[in-house]
């Protein structure tokens, strides 16, 4: 969230959602909403039996929340849906073709005129073009709306924009991100694969995805594995980027003020996602920080090999003001993906941040990093 007014709007949304569900609107409300949603699904699994994977769980939960899910892969799919449920019978469907544009991931609506055997809610999922990789997540998102609204949608028609999100959409995304990898199904498979491999690798992510979350995107499965990993690990993305000052310089150049030195983009950190154990170490790979030329990340970007793995000292990662971001050893697995390098960074249990020397102790108190099973 970018600024204070957005954070405030989000906080208001959390309070409203907690009140609707009869949860206390105190403390870490986001966490208690996620816990409530996780428990709701857990109770469903206890009553109905364990589904074979997370896609199966999603289908069954959708049915239990009375939502019919329709995937739209082409204009032909919209035509078929409108033929089956004509707008003369369900007038709100007349808006569908126009509403399900390229800026929209999904639409959910409450049926006004349905046959007894038809579901009261209809979720229409945009699977065209770039929306396709998001479809698993989009379905969860629409189901979570019903869970948060108390099984009765507060709006007859709601669309999910892919960008520019209302605070309620941010909250639903957050919960969907956790439930799409429900710990009761995801956890056992993930931990078995992690133990067999000895550390989190891209292959582990792929095996876990195939086994338990076959419809999830590679990227969302990766974030889920990082989140569930008990030892400190970062998921870094790097690509050619400019420094902020260079961006301003380029803007000046474009407006014709100067044309002497053209800045060159360098390999920089695009995003850095630590899991809880890594965040507690206090080590931060800052957004936009330059990737050291001697790093394996640079090697994966520049070299002929698009997959590189091995150790490197944390000290080579320096902030622009000069100092290293920490001390210790890293184990990296880096893969080139198009213009980007994706990298899993393990931090050994003795690593410390130069920013907060207490980071390591904090990690120990929380039980992170004490018995790191990863040796390198
Ligand atoms: Zn939504």
Image (cartoon, helix red, strand yellow):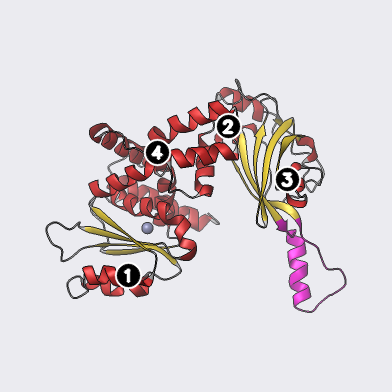
Height in image: 16 above or below 251?
above
What are the residue bounds of the magenta stretch? 240-266
Height in image: 183 above or below 138?
above
Q: CA distance from mark 2 to mark 1?
A: 46 Å
Please identify the quadrant where the C terminus is shown. Answer: top right
Checking the image for residue 78, the label placed there is 1
Q: As rendered, which of 88 and 248 lies closer to the eye?
A: 88
Q: CA distance from mark 4 to mark 3?
A: 32 Å
Residue marked by disc 3: 297
At label 3, counting other C-alpha atoms closer than 10 Å, the crowd grade (few under 14, some 14-19, many 20 or more) is many
Residue marked by disc 4: 182
Asked if labels 2 and 3 touch by Cβ distance under 8 angstroms, the answer is: no
Asked if labels 3 and 4 touch by Cβ distance under 8 angstroms, the answer is: no
x and y, in percent, of residue 85 in the image: 21, 68
Outermost residue on the top side: it is: 371
Residue marked by disc 2: 277
**What kind of element bears circle 3?**
helix
Outermost residue on the right side: it is: 260
x and y, in percent, of residue 63 in the image: 24, 49
Q: CA distance from mark 4 to mark 1?
A: 31 Å
């Amino acid at each position: 969230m970018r600024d204070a007014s957005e954070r405030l709007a989000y906080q208001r949304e959390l309070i409203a959602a907690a009140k609707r569900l009869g949860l206390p609107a105190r403390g870490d409300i986001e966490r208690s909403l996620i816990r409530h949603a996780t428990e709701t699904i857990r109770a469903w699994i206890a009553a109905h039996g364990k589904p074979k994977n997370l896609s199966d769980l999603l289908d069954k939960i959708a049915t239990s929340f009375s939502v019919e899910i329709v995937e739209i892969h082409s204009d032909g799919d919209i035509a078929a849906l409108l033929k089956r449920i004509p707008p003369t019978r369900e007038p709100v469907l007349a808006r569908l073709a126009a509403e399900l544009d390229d800026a929209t991931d999904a639409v959910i609506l409450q049926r006004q005129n349905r046959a007894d055997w038809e579901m009261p809610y209809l979720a229409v999922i945009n699977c065209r073009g770039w929306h396709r990789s998001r479809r698993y997540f989009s379905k969860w998102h629409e189901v979570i709306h019903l869970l948060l609204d108390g099984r009765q949608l507060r709006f007859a028609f709601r669309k999910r924009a892919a960008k520019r999100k209302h605070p309620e959409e941010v909250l639903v995304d957050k919960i969907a991100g956790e439930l799409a990898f429900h710990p009761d199904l995801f956890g056992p498979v993930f931990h078995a694969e992690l133990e067999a491999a000895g550390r989190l690798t891209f292959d582990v992510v792929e095996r876990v995805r195939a086994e338990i979350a076959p419809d999830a995107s590679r990227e969302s499965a990766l974030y889920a594995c990082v989140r569930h990993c008990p030892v400190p690990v970062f998921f870094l993305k790097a690509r050619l980027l400019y420094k902020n000052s260079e961006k301003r310089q380029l803007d000046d150049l474009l407006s014709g003020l100067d044309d002497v030195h053209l800045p060159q983009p360098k390999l920089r950190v695009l995003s850095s996602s630590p899991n809880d154990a890594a965040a507690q170490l206090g080590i931060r790979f800052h957004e936009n920080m330059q990737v050291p030329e001697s790093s394996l990340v640079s090697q994966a970007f520049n070299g002929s090999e698009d997959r590189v793995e091995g150790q490197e000292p944390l000290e080579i990662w320096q902030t622009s003001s000069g100092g290293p971001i920490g001390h210790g050893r890293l184990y990296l697995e880096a893969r080139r993906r198009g213009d980007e390098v994706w990298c899993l960074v393990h931090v050994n249990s003795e690593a410390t941040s130069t920013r907060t020397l207490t980071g390591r102790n904090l990690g120990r108190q929380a039980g992170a990093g004490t018995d790191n099973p990863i040796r390198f």
